[in-house]
Amino acid sequence: MKKIASTKVLFGFFNTIFFACGFVKVVCGFLLLCDTRRILLSRLLAMPEDGLEEPPFYYVALGLLVAGVTVCTVAAIGVWATYIPGYIILTFYFLVVLALLVAECAAGVLAAVWPRCYGVQAARGGAVGALQSYYAVPDFEHFTAALDLAQTELECCGMTSARNYDMSLWQLRRLGPRGLSVPPSCCVQSAPRSHLSPAPADPARCQELAPNATYRHVPGCQTKLEDWYQEQYFIFMISLFVVAVFKLAILLSTVFSCIRLRKSRQEMNSFMIKGFGCKNENIYERNMSLHDEPITAKYIQPNNFYSPRVRNPRIFHTKPNEMV
């Protein structure tokens, strides 16, 4: 019983950690969903022609919420399975945790093999063309807001430089105010900064052909976007690795618990069988094993078995003194 109790305590401890991981996932997904700037900036991870209705981080936040709720539910099933005498629920719990572990490993492999889905290659390939084709174009307002946010927060201008705007539709079609060589989000702003309604510190000096770092952001956004993407990618991979390690520990603890429970129940059954075996032992066979002759070979008559007895006068009134 002590072994079973200790096994249940160990399994419950791992399930508590597993539940905590699910709760942390839910919290991270909710915080990411509330981080509108990060989600908007992730709009640059995918090109507008990819057809995503929402930024990629929006789907990542929903995925974290769903995964966190799933992990919490599975952890609750694991706690319930600890106190179930059979192995059906425990086997189901083991298979679900294994499926979650395989899914997260597949996500990590996908991130390593095809990093474009996490934005690592988005800034390298097609970023300049996307800027020249979609910036300030109607029906692509989200891409425009994302690029303005990147230029404001990362303090950059264009993808490689401000010259990217020279051949853009924003410049060729005069989609912006006249006399602008770069969007106002490229200018150094006075606090507080805003990407929706930028207020340059010196609008005239910012729009000069010769860039001045005091009034305009000179470096391009491509390198800074790549650094930002790599940071998000690193955080994502570390989180996947930590959760995968915890799930692997859960799987090992499940197998260990099944083995210990099986051994403990076998020991209890053998102990009970031995106990009942001693009580149900045939006394005649035991006596025959101790003596060579059969049990009917000797018969000893008890003493005074047929001794005379007087009837009780209180019970037998008619013949009180008759000998039996």
Image: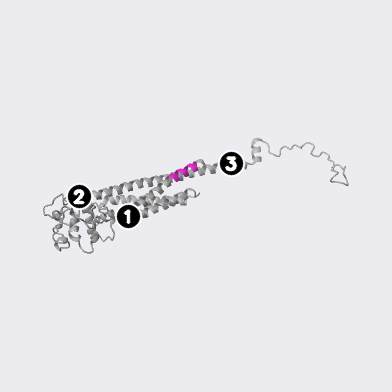
User: Residue 198, relative to residue 284: is it above or below?
Assistant: below
The span from disc 3 to disc 1 (Cα, nearest Å) is: 65 Å
Crowding at dot 1, Cα within 10 Å, few <14 / some 14-19 / many 20+, comes out as few
User: At numbered mark 3, what does the secondary structure look like: helix, strand or loop?
Assistant: helix
Report the coloring of the rendering: one colour
Left or right relative to 237: residue 77: right
C-alpha span from label 3 to label 2: 77 Å
Residue linked to disc 3: 275
Where does label 2 land, which residue?
Answer: 223
Residue 126 is left or right of residue 54, and the answer is: left
Label 2 SS: helix
Q: Position of residue 128 (x, y in %)?
A: 18, 56
The residue sitting at 32% across, 54% down in the picture is 34
Dot 1 lies on which element?
Answer: helix
**Lower sequence index among marks 3 and 2:** 2
Q: Position of residue 20 (x, y in %)?
A: 40, 48
The answer to whether 82 appears left or right of 148 in the picture is: right
Does any portion of residue 47 appear in the rendered image? no
- Name the disc covering residue 34, or none: 1
Total numbered labels: 3
Quadrant location of the C terminus in the rendered image: top right
Categorize mark 2 by other alpha carbons within 10 Å: few (<14), some (14-19), many (20+): some
Kindly report the distance in space between the C-alpha atoms of the residues bearing marks 1 and 2.
26 Å
- Kind of residue at badge 3: Gly
Amino acid marked by disc 2:
Thr
Magenta-colored span? 3-13
Q: Residue 48 sits in which quadrant?
A: bottom left
